[in-house]
Amino acid sequence: GAGVSQSPSNKVTEKGKDVELRCDPISGHTALYWYRQRLGQGLEFLIYFQGNSAPDKSGLPSDRFSAERTGESVSTLTIQRTQQEDSAVYLCASSSRQGARETQYFGPGTRLLVL
Amino acid sequence: SQQGEEDPQALSIQEGENATMNCSYKTSINNLQWYRQNSGRGLVHLILIRSNEREKHSGRLRVTLDTSKKSSSLLITASRAADTASYFCATLDTGRRALTFGSGTRLQVQP
């Protein structure tokens, strides 16, 4: 079956512009996660959805970052008034609710470059 | 914030040799997972070890977990050039759903 997909693959934008990143999780997966990975570093957690509610937004770095999810499907991560420090790969993952054996399946990521 | 620290940061070995990577963490966990990443893009899940397990095998991979020392190791036996990638440990902390990742080990396997 299809894995997690993300679009666009790459995005170049100018400082101050808004961007929207999209994630299509694996069908039937109730949990969806957004992470950010700066060059040469590990992943930083941003936000987690269970269904269309977000019980954990603790990783969002500022109020310029927001995300939404419609039902148990597509999620959009929006970054307003982008800054150069926002340049990174944004990775989405999904999982089915399996408690302590939860495995997250990752998409290929969106590489964002803010000029 | 990143709680995992991985050691070494970079490792270069010859094909056929074994590669060992270590990970330390700070909090109480439900499980610890290892992921592989090629070319800075999507991550591939390799293996999951639960907090009540001490060792797990999957093919050429062997993972150990020592919760008293808050550390884990990943051993790749008989390495191949295709194993060249970055390897990350990630913990599922007690009471949370999101993974906390280490900074990764870059493995280079020379043919």
Image: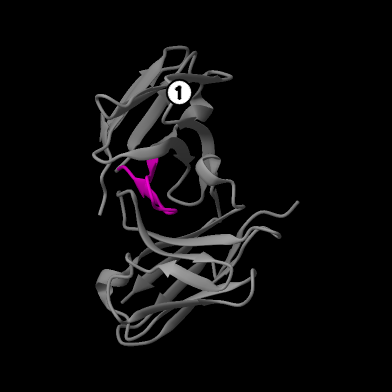
Q: Quadrant of residue B65?
A: top left
Question: Which one is nearer the viewer's eye here, A38 or B50?
Answer: B50
Name which quarter of the figure residue B6 lies in: top left
Q: Which residues are magenta?
A: B90-102
Judge from the rendering whether residue A92 lies leftward or rightward of residue A114; answer left or right.
right
Vertical side of B54 occupied by B24: above or below:
below
In magenta segment, residue B92: yes
Q: Position of residue A75 (x, y in %)?
A: 56, 72
- Identify the image quadrant of residue B94: top left
Which residue is at 71% across, 60% downward? A27
* Left/right of residue A41 with respect to residue A94 in the rendered view: left
Residue at the disc numbered 1: B53
Q: Residue at x 46, y 73 (%)?
A: A11
In percent of width and height, residue B41 lies at 47, 52
Q: Secondary structure at mark 1?
A: loop
Chain where mark 1 sits: B
Residue B89 visible in rendering = no
Q: Residue at x 47, y 15 (%)?
A: B77
In depth, the one of A50 and A18 nearer the eye is A50
